[in-house]
Image (cartoon, grey):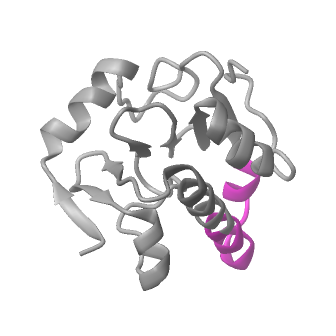
Amino acid sequence: MIWRESDYESTWEPFDRQFAFAPNFYERTAPAIELPVGALVVDLSPIFAHEGPRFASGETAINAAALRSFIWLAEDEELLALDWQHQTYRYSPAEHVLQDASMFVPVFPNGDYYAHMPADLRWGTFGHPWQQTLTIWGDELVGTLGAELLTWLPRHPQSTV
């Protein structure tokens, strides 16, 4: 099984502790997490500004780029996939690609807060659906996924890098 269900509380607890996650549907300016030093926040509003194929292609591109970066950085390591108020998972990005499986928890925040990271939280992503942002942290992931996304999406002013 590529996507294995994980206990919700024990999966979210390290993330909450490190990033002081504070979900709030009505908050549109302050980030929902304490941004780590060196975090890149990418503005996804140019994607959200469109419907149909333009939106779908942007969403697909973000998910594909993230998965590619995860494979290069994680190799055989499992990642945690957090979906606020829904099932959490552990998964192998490499096995996911080899099996051509669907993403149970996407990276692109189309409807909820989503986060992907290794268990030690050294790098990862946090998608904020209402602010239409994707936060990327960890030098390795900022240098790969972040650099790629900045070729076609703007840096959000919340960035700490």
Mark yes or no: residue 110 visible. yes
Q: Quadrant of the N terminus?
A: bottom left
Left-right relation of 112 to 7:
right
In the image, farthest residue toward the front? 76
Q: Quadrant of the C terminus?
A: top right
Residue 23: x and y in percent read 35, 30
Q: Residue at x 24, y 36 (%)?
A: 12
- Identify which residue, 43 or 36, lies in the foreground: 36
Residue 126: x and y in percent read 49, 40
Left-right relation of 116 to 88:
right
Magenta: predominant secondary structure element? Answer: helix
Q: Which residues are drawn in magenta? A: 45-60
Mark yes or no: residue 44 visible. no
- Identify which residue, 2 or 131, lies in the foreground: 2
Determine which quarter of the picture holds residue 111: bottom left
Check the image and report above or below for 37 versus 39: above
- Identify which residue, 148 or 71, lies in the foreground: 71
Q: Residue at x 85, y 53 (%)?
A: 152
Residue 7: x and y in percent read 12, 48
- Identify which residue, 1 or 108, lies in the foreground: 1
Q: Is residue 57 magenta?
A: yes
Check the image and report above or below for 100 versus 112: below
Residue 85: x and y in percent read 23, 47
Left-right relation of 30 to 13:
right
Q: Is residue 23 magenta?
A: no
Q: Residue at x 42, y 84 (%)?
A: 99
In the image, farthest residue toward the right? 151
Q: Residue at x 64, y 37 (%)?
A: 140
Determine which quarter of the picture holds residue 22: top left
